[in-house]
Image (spheres, grey):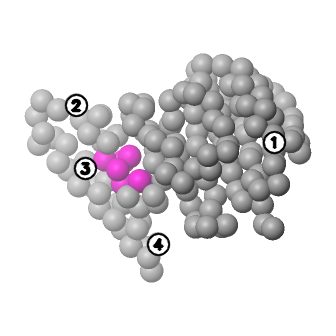
Amino acid sequence: MIEKRRVAVVALALGLGLLITPALAGCNPAQIAQDAVENAVEDATGVQVDANGDGNVSMPDDWPAEIPVISGTLSMSSALGSGADTVWSVAVKTSDAQAAYNDATGKLKGAGYTSDFESNADGMSTGMFSNGKYSVGVTTSTDGSDQTLVYVVSVIPQ
């Protein structure tokens, strides 16, 4: 029931956004539509997204401090669940996915994380790292000129 309500809210928000766009003379219709989509997704899911590329995404408030993250502009962040069941994720835009991967894995290893698995195939790098408390997945993604490094973090059950 809640999921149906979220879908209805998102659909309504998108519809209203598209209906009022022509009435807002002097405004950028594409920007208004992007903002409406971004806000609808964030409101419905709690996941911050950057659909328009303005860099208006921040780290999850409860991101574990002992997990280093490369510097860059975030395009997505989320914290789903609570307590030991929380799964965090962030996506960092980069101009060089392989260099970003090397930087990220170097920072993790420098912070005491060990590599459980690493692979590089067809220009995509991925790895799993752990420190006994957290499991950290790091993956690169390249879509044309858009390159992103994604972290997915979970608590290791004790």
- Taking depth in this image into account, of 106 and 77 the one nearest to the observer is 106
Q: Which residues are magenta?
A: 36-42
* Residue 21 visible in the picture: yes
Q: In front: mark 4 or mark 1? A: 1
Question: For numbered disc 3, what is the local secondary structure?
Answer: helix
According to the picture, the residue beneath numbered tag 4 turns out to be: 3
According to the picture, the residue beneath numbered tag 2 turns out to be: 28
Going from N to C along the chain, the mark reached first, 3 or 1, is 3
* Residue 78 visible in the picture: no
Q: CA distance from mark 2 to mark 4?
A: 32 Å
Q: Is residue 1 above or below residue 44?
A: below
User: What is the three-letter code of the residue carrying label 1?
Assistant: Tyr
User: What is the three-letter code of the residue carrying label 3?
Assistant: Gly
Q: CA distance from mark 3 to mark 4?
A: 21 Å
Q: In front: mark 1 or mark 2? A: 1
Quarter of the C terminus within the rendering = bottom right
Q: Position of residue 42 (x, y in %)?
A: 41, 53
Residue 4 lies in quadrant: bottom left
Going from N to C along the chain, the mark reached first, 2 or 4, is 4
**Overall secondary structure of the magenta section:** helix
Quarter of the N terminus within the rendering = bottom left
Question: For numbered disc 1, what is the local secondary structure?
Answer: loop
User: What is the three-letter code of the residue carrying label 2?
Assistant: Asn
Going from N to C along the chain, the mark reached first, 1 or 2, is 2
According to the picture, the residue beneath numbered tag 3 turns out to be: 17
According to the picture, the residue beneath numbered tag 1 turns out to be: 113
